[in-house]
Amino acid sequence: MRKTILYLVILAVLGIAVYFFLIKSNDNPYGQTEAGFTVKDTAAIGKLFIADNDGESVLVERTDSGWVVNKKYKALRSTLNMILTTLTRQAALYPVTKNAYENVIKNLSTDGKKVEVYGRDGKKITVFYVGGVAVNNTGTNMLMEGAKMPYVVQVQGFNGYLTSQYTTNMADWRDRTIFSFQPDEIKSVSIQYPDKPINSFAINRENGTFSVSADTNITKHLDPLNIRRINVYLKYFGNVNCEGYLNGFIDTHESIATAPKRATMEITGMHGQRQHADIYWMPINKRSKNLTVANEDVPDDYDADRMYAVINDGQDTVMIQQMIFKNMFRKSFEFYQKDVTPTQMPPNNEPPRNVMMHKNQ
């Protein structure tokens, strides 16, 4: 009986020890110097620096106005959240095997990425190198700065490898906002259609009063200006994003050079903010849905889902989606029509029958 009680006491002590060592304390059994890949307090992070062996790098810093990439661009929230989550959840599984050691070290030296993590006070939290996928395809090879032994690192519950999450591609890091104006922040909106200028218009706000500049061949035959529709329309510019950046793709620039311009958009804020976008049709391709099923709103030679846009004073070329921009492609006469529904602009762009149509419309 006494032996049984003694065994139970020993098991209980061992159980408590294991709990506090592996679970409660969250300590790394391999040691922070050799395998300290986990950064538990991401709120304390003030700066991240990632560099690869191709000379590409990103510097991501916390500022009073949010996270900034390379001291110039607002950081994309999804990429930032992904890497912060990875830092707090990644942990060393085991040291790489002796058989894999030389190949892992070689890979880290030729294709690895260096990751530096700093606190808000500027002090270094950790530095490590990220390599390729482990031999069993269930982890990522990593090496702490100053350590001799690389480890296989994994995020619990995630079977992929982590190398791609430590991206140095600026297109992955840059915020994709094109327009971000609240309705009461907008001073003017100009939409110009080069192929059908009669549909072009400009909305202006002066001392709280709206006016619309448009072709008088259309507006003189319509009802008075519909202020409610203007207020609804301005809401479309609150959160408009591109699908991705296309800078550096030669094929894209060649396509834009030959594609007709669909529209020019310019938004000016009450405090001088400005964003200009030149929007071009994207040539139809093997992924285009209208390759087999025509879209009545899109010419057969162009993609029905996506377009190109040149923004930021010509510095950036981006891909945009038709479904996001279609509500902004309105026509001048729509702001002089009576309401069709109480909550939104009409779903189509057809003019009323009593409007005198221009031959080019």
Image (cartoon, helix red, strand yellow):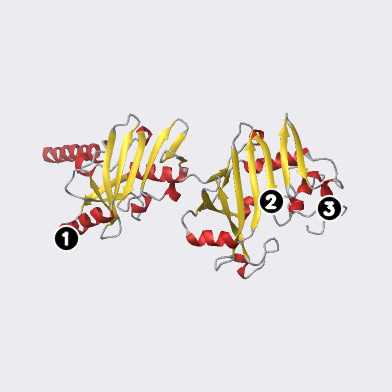
Q: Quadrant of residue 98?
A: bottom left
The quarter of the image holding the N terminus is top left
Judge left or right: residue 208 versus residue 48: right
Pinpoint residue 214: horizontal percent, then vertical percent: 77, 45
Residue found at x 69% / y 51%: 329
Q: Nearer the viewer, mark 2 or mark 1?
A: 2
| Residue toward you, 143 or 25 | 143
Q: CA distance from mark 2 to mark 1?
A: 61 Å
| Residue 39 in sight from this viewpoint | no
Instruction: Read off the residue under disc 3.
Output: 352
Q: Amino acid at mark 1?
A: Asn
Spatial distance from mark 3 to mark 2, Cα to Cα? 17 Å
Cα separation, mark 3 vs mark 1, equals 77 Å
Q: Which image quarter is the C terminus in?
A: bottom right
Residue to which mark 1 is pinned: 99
| Mark 1 surroundings within 10 Å by alpha-carbon count, few (fewer than 14), some (14 through 19), many (20 or more) | few
| Left or right relative to 105: residue 51 | right
Q: Nearer the viewer, residue 240 or 53?
A: 53
Q: Identify the residue at horizontal 50%, vertical 62% (top origin).
A: 251
Residue nearest the observer in this picture, 318 or 28: 318
Image disc number at residue 329: 2
Q: Callout 2: helix, strand or loop?
A: loop
Residue lying furthest bottom in this view? Answer: 292
Q: Amino acid at mark 2?
A: Phe
In this rendering, would 344 be left or right of 59? right
Relative image position of residue 104 (x, y in whole percent)? 22, 56
Disc on the earlier residue, 3 or 2: 2
Report the amino acid beneath label 3. Answer: Pro
Q: Are marks 3 and 2 in contact (CB under 8 Å)?
A: no
